[in-house]
Image (cartoon, coloured by chain):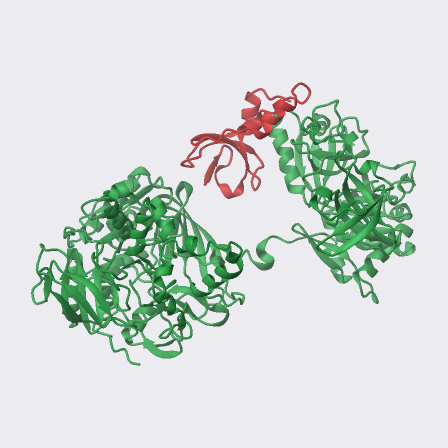
Chain colours: A red, B green
Amino acid sequence: MIINHPILGPRDAQEFVYLGDASLMNRPDGMSDGIEAFHDYLYNRDNPAGAHRELWYHEQGDRSWLVVTRNTVTHEILKVELARDVASKAGRGK
Amino acid sequence: MTQVNRIAGGQIDRATTFRFTFDGLPYTGHPGDTLASALLANGVRLMGRSFKYHRPRGPLSAGSEEPNALVQLRTGARQEPNSRATVAELFDGLTASSQNAWPSLRFDAMALNDRLSTFFTAGFYYKTFMWPAAFWEKVYEPMIRRAAGLGRLTREEDPDEYDKGFLHCDLLVIGAGPAGLMAALTAGRAGARVILADEDFRMGGRLNAETFEVGGQPGADWAAAAVSELAAIDNVRLMKRTTVIGAFDHGIYGAVERVSDHLPVPLPGKPRQTLWRIYSRRAILAGGATERPIAFENNDRPGIMLAGSLRAYANRWAVTVGDRVAIFINNDDGLRSATDLQAKGVDVVAVIDARADGPLLPDIRHLKGAEVIDTRGRLGLTSITICQSNGRIETIRASALGVSGGWNPNVNISSHHRSRPVWDEAIQSFIPGHDGPPGLSAAGAAAGALSTHGALATGQAQAIAALADLGRTARAELLPEAEDAPVSITPKWYVAGGKGRAWIDPQNDVTVKDVKLAHQENFTSVEHLKRYTTLGMATDQGKTANVLGLAIMAGLTGRTIPETGTTIYRPPYTPVAMGTLAGRSRGRAFKPTRLTPSHAWAEEQGAVFVEVGQWLRTQWIPRPGEVHWRDSVDREVLATRKSVGICDVTTLGKIDIQGTDAGAFLDRVYANTFSTLAVGKCRYGLMLREDGMVFDDGTTARLGAHEYVMTTTTANAVTVFRHLEFCRQVLWPDMDVQLISTTEAWAQYSVAGPNARRLLERIVDQDISDAAFPYMAAGNVTVGGLRARLFRISFSGELAYEIAVPARYGDALIRRLVEEGRAFDAVVYGTEALGVMRVEKGHVAGNELNGQSTALNMGLGKMVSKKKDSIGMVLSGREGMVDPDGYRLVGVRPVSPEGKLTAGSHFLEIGAAAVVANDGGWLTSKVYSPHLGSDIALGYLKAGDRKIGQRMRAVNLLAGTDTEVEIVSPHFFDPEGERLRG
């Protein structure tokens, strides 16, 4: 596969490490949320046949974490974003 | 033996003669021959035995689809089993042998299987060997493996190199027949970057095997001229002997180039094969078509082959398979075999044409509406029995029979992304579906355009379309004139009515009866048919067999072929050697080897090294007279505890963390708190995974208000860094914190022991007295004016420091430390002594940080701060993970000092039976403590914190040990920590 890195352009998927569902971005707050919320965050995932937002890490590159929107049926890559931008826009903050 | 079956013409170089052997007998051939064509020229039809029934077999084909003629090439370390003789390029001195036959190819004892064929029908594995279950592993499987098999490996290491390469192009053209050549010419002339890959050693595809004219010249000559033109175009790369094995995502194709298979040994510096990864913007599949047989009784004898292959041997290789040739067909194309062979002067005894209508050949005995119903000849065809349209049975003497049931487009690569081929009624076969790999189109016979004109026209059209997609214009030049015969075929899959066996898939010995049995037992879907009968599951992936098998199933179920459907293909298109996939990643080159800055010095001392991940670390350094590793390790430990020891700890991961939020960031990623750490101090940190298990540990120092340096374990250096980047970018994107891995930037040595400070005082420029540099101090210092870092931390329990200098000074520093250390009888110790001292001190390491242990298990539960949010904090509080009766880290000593402990032993109460229900936990790490004079161990024991002082047993059923032990504190050595604060 080829991932069109927002900064570095098309890169071979071999340069990346795959993590999984981009919902891992939505970590609850440990001071206000409890075990149930963390359990749901950590273990419950959607497994769509189709568009899937997922986290890839450009380990053999610039170390960017990316949110890659990939069709799990065709492997077509629909969108690639810097995870930091996505997280920041989503209000993850500090 | 002479080349008795060599006829006139062909594309072989008769001026040169190659000598080769098959099963020890000498033969001759010529450049341009394959092993199969040369053997056939020498009158050898028998080349192998079938997989299951050990039936005598000769080649069915003249190409890569070959199911039968599998042989072993070469001898010794280069011996290569399961090679298709039909594509093995002949070279002088080639040694080939048959396989799957004992004691000889002509007399094979396992042919007994053929007599027992009733027991080996479809599904026999599932039926015959089910009972008793215990027999499968010990009796049935070894028996089947011995009897049914392919070639054998030599078990010697392959002496050749295999390489990997990367290529980029605008257009990849797969196959260099008329369609592929035309596509490459069209795109190449237009200036596109083109790769033309073809599996054959001579480009041209079927044009080399036919007598057609193209543009007024023989097809093979036109192909040669096209190749010459392409070779002169800079933007075209021609890759013969290169099989495109698969279509992967986003225009990436895999290809295997057989760089040196046609040579006795590779040329100096050349690999045997190269695995190419081709990045293409567009691709055209012009892989041609594969002929399929018609099934009839005993249709697998040597001498019976595909009609198109029969004429390929005659036209390209100047070989007739026999002196009396018959042809059995259901389509017009097969008639070409009769006319071509007759034109070459071969005696064509009959054309058995299953069709009642259609053209009638002049000057040949052409029997319309006839069928071949049986054959004879134990080791090769001697006669065929036919049934004429009027029902008359006749036996005809023949030594070769060409069979044609039609041509199947080679759709394989088009279905690598799960696209289903679609049925084309006109050609009675499947063509590529429309939802194939994006950017791939098909041309020529692969697309169902089976005439030469059709190939040229579609090749040109697809190239123009592909370039138009890329915004380029290619000209549609006038096509050379070529035959454009329509496909005329009447479906005929098998000859019904017989009682014997009619083969569909000769490599896996699947017959019409097997398909009928599968139908009878309701395995009627194509996927069930495949798995129940093993149809198409052999190394040829059923290239000649699949369509035939499913068409027969369609007939049995009364469904149409499109209703019945087809299985699809997976990469690789043809078998690939494991060595090719491995490339250079084998032996020591399998992974990188990382050396620490003291490596050269350690080698000079005769150190013994151990692999730790990618690193080589000093395990111990033997001295003269030491005969056992324990001699060295005990000495290193005792000398360190007595005076001072030096150890290279460079391999520990080091991460610089800077930014105004660095402290807050560390509070989130560590279970304990770092924002409160004073500048110039360091602290042990425990890092959890989000699920609450311990991830890693290490010390982190604060070098400035906004600057920390983290240490990770050697094993987790990469994954911790990745995790920290995840936390920084994805979880808390607005934190002001930056990371950089500095593992390789610093050479770091531990200096431990009562004289550690005295030694370092000779080296470090600054005051490092206990008052100036107390326990857990950290900071920048200089060593002879050079920048360095000093940490007062201890893994051994001794007064200890870690000193770091830029990596390029690491060699100088180890030599300096050793030199200055002479005054103190300093010793350099390796990972074993390090391990002994850390167990004596009760520190956890890899064996305890096993990914299944919590802070509580390790006795570090209080380190998980609840006053702040941190990764893993919440879930570490889950029920079950806070079980008061859960595992706790304990120390273990044998009751008798001579008692032996083994890591992995399980804790049992005295007198309890050694069964799982009584299991109390296990010993994680065991060492011999020279300080205590006995084995000691760490372990995880259920409710271990309440069992200190108790006696138990450490039982290891594998090692056969059962030792009475005392459960003690894990801190065997200096539990109050007085030494490290000294």
Nearest to the observer: residue B141 or residue B262: B141
Vertically, is B303 above or below B773?
Answer: below
The quadrant in which the N terminus of chain B is found is bottom left
Question: Viewed as shown, does residue B846 lie left or right of B931?
Answer: left
Question: Viewed as shown, does residue B535 lie left or right of B399?
Answer: right
Vertically, is B547 above or below B203?
Answer: above
Q: Give the percent coordinates (x, y) of residue B778.
A: 82, 37
Q: Give the percent coordinates (x, y) of residue B388.
A: 12, 62
Q: Residue at x 65, y 51 (%)?
A: B614
Q: Can residue B271 be seen in the rendering of this structure? A: no
Vertically, is B192 above or below A84?
Answer: below
Q: Give the percent coordinates (x, y) of residue B87.
A: 34, 64
Nearest to the observer: residue B183 or residue B423: B423
Residue B868: name its quadrant: top right
Q: Residue at x 21, y 51 (%)?
A: B450
Residue A34: name its quadrant: top right
Nearest to the observer: residue B764 or residue B972: B972
Q: Give the percent coordinates (x, y) of residue B685.
A: 76, 34
